Image: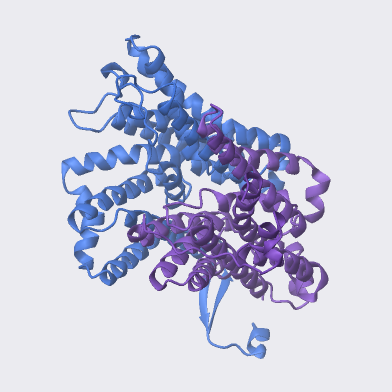
Amino acid sequence: MDGTQAIILTIITASTPLLLAAIGELVVERSGVLNLGVEGMMVMGAVCGFATAYTTGSPTLGIFAGIMAGVGMAFIFAFMTQTLVSNQVATGLALTLLGLGLSGLIGESFVGLPGVKLTPISIPLLGDIPFIGRILFGQDILVYASLALVVATTYVLFRTRIGLIIRAVGDNHHSAHSLGYNVIMVRYACILFGGACAGLSGAYLSLAYTPQWIENMTAGRGWIALALVVFATWLPKRLAIGAYLFGTVWIMGLYVQAQGLGIPSQFLSSLPYLVTIIALVIISGNKTLTRVNTPACIGQSFVPDR
Amino acid sequence: MRLILEKRSEHSEFMTLMSPLLAIFLTVITGAIIFALQGLNPLEALYVYFVEPVTSMWSIEEVLVKAAPLILIGVGLSICYMANVWNIGAEGQLTMGATFGSIVPIFFTSWQSPLTLVAMLICGAIGGAAFAAIPAFLKNRFNANEILTSLMLVYIAQLILDWLVRGPWRDPKGYNFPQSIPFEDWQLLPTLGDGRVHIGIILAIVAVIILSILMSRTLKGFEIMVVGNSPRAGRFSGFSRKKTVWFCLLLSGGLAGLAGIGEVAGPSGQLQPSISPGYGFTAIIVAFLGRLNPIGVFFAGIMLAITYIGGEGAQVVLGVSDKTAQVFQGILLFFILACDTLILYRIKLLGSVTPQQAAAE
């Protein structure tokens, strides 16, 4: 395995968690809800995924546990913001703070233990093609799942009735309500989907990216996923491109660091955060790009009047 | 069975006062359940967490030391959130305040004057404000979401500090530990009496009083509230949204910076890679528990400081993880937000409602 191939492989593993978490949040925001708790749901997915996989020895169960942890956290958020109409920004922050604390507590006895790694699938013949074989056909199942999720989300959001309802709820909840759609229920479903994706993304981190549990191991990826959704102007295709761009930045930072060019490591570690800010600035400054796709009701609570 | 929210005709004054207390009560109950599940005596555990920190002079002093930065930051954030400006990067502004303020003791080691400390505090506030100016500028000029930019800057600030204390600012006599030179006596905040309480708490109280007057007695305070609660009305009355964004971020950044230099020139006495146990994030909870009211923030800051000290105590006495305090803080914020619903709505639990009944309403 030569150097370039190794780098491409790590870029894919670094981009996948960003893509998974961001695609979930994209659906949530399309339904008009801003869930800032991605980081919290993700870190809970990571710790529950790791703990389950470690205890049972099965990465599959770990992935399942990660998803469930994300869904559980998302349910708290949905109940608070949809049923009790609490402020979405504040509740999202609360979810992140709770997730970071709770994951630290749960994970305390798992720090430093060797993890169970999710093994890549290997397709005979195709996987043996030099260079591109490993890259295209030798990834773990979640990499393919994340890409399939992008295609499926694009299809559902823009080609099906369900997608139309989700977007209607996100763009004008009063009209959607008048047409007889249950705004609250649609949003509940989207929030839970977002939680599942964030939990899965966390489990990917602790089972495939670095198979171990480290406190706060999400390291701001949940927030970067949120920024990615804005960067992609709420379009799944652009989201995939964005996630891979960010994954590349993340890995290039580590790669340059390993080369020892005398650049302070802290500067390279700050690159993903710096690039996130720059990307946000570029996209947000472009009014035509953002206005077209921004869900009009994002962040607004809806109380059906009776 | 389902929950129904019924809008009150006007918001309930009673609930405005009660909701934080109710939230604390619910958190305590939840805490008791968690402790019972861990096989601890819930009453004893709650005593260690919430009462013991205020039973001895020593621990009361520790509570005040921790409350000072929480109140300073929380009071600034409460004004931000009032104006719908979501600065969540106070932790980064605190870090930069600590870094900027430390320029004085690190580069002017021998400048011994009563003004040394004043210069440090001013530099700290400027550092925090300058760092908060970045999201303010990006918000106003490029419409970049301040939540995300201010949070990303937290990581960047911590990496800058990490680089400084491991690189150029490392104490040559520090046996390679990542820390700056220790500050001299005249570069440390004076303590009140012989204890550990330093004048940071006085600064916090002054900030609470000034901002409380600002919000309740001045046009600026009114402007902040109008812009935050009703942006349209704000535009019609000629209040500038952009100026409000600048004002709120610079103010809260400056206060966070002050808290930062207060930490290094207070309890820690030198720059280290990690100077705060997440004060900038806990202060978000403080702001909400204080109902975004400066006076309320004061009491909320004391309350959250108690959970920090109680958490440390519980770790020693009960062998409970120190992470438990953080979980409590998170749960508390959830209960605060949930109880705030009661100010504007009545909650009704309905059995299954038939369409006719619903129509009759």
B228 lies above or below B190: below
Q: Residue at x 60, y 44 (%)?
A: A250
Residue in view at x 46 percent, y 54 percent:
A97
Q: Position of residue A61 (x, y in %)?
A: 49, 73
What residue is at 33 percent from the left and 29 percent from the top?
B177
A110 lies above or below B210: below
Name the image colouring. by chain
User: Is A142 drawn above or below residue A180 in the view shown?
Assistant: above
Q: Is residue A266 visible?
A: yes
Q: How many marks?
A: 0
Q: Position of residue B340 (x, y in %)?
A: 49, 60
> Can residue B18 be seen by looking at this rendering?
no
Chain with purple colouring: A
The image shows residue B172, relative to residue B89, as above or below, that is: above
> In the rendered image, what is the letter of the chain coloured blue?
B
The x and y percentages for residue A297 are: 71, 59
Q: Nearer the viewer, residue A180 or A121?
A: A121
Q: Give the left or right position of residue B264, taking residue A74 as reference.
A: left
Name the foreground residue: A66 vs B332.
A66
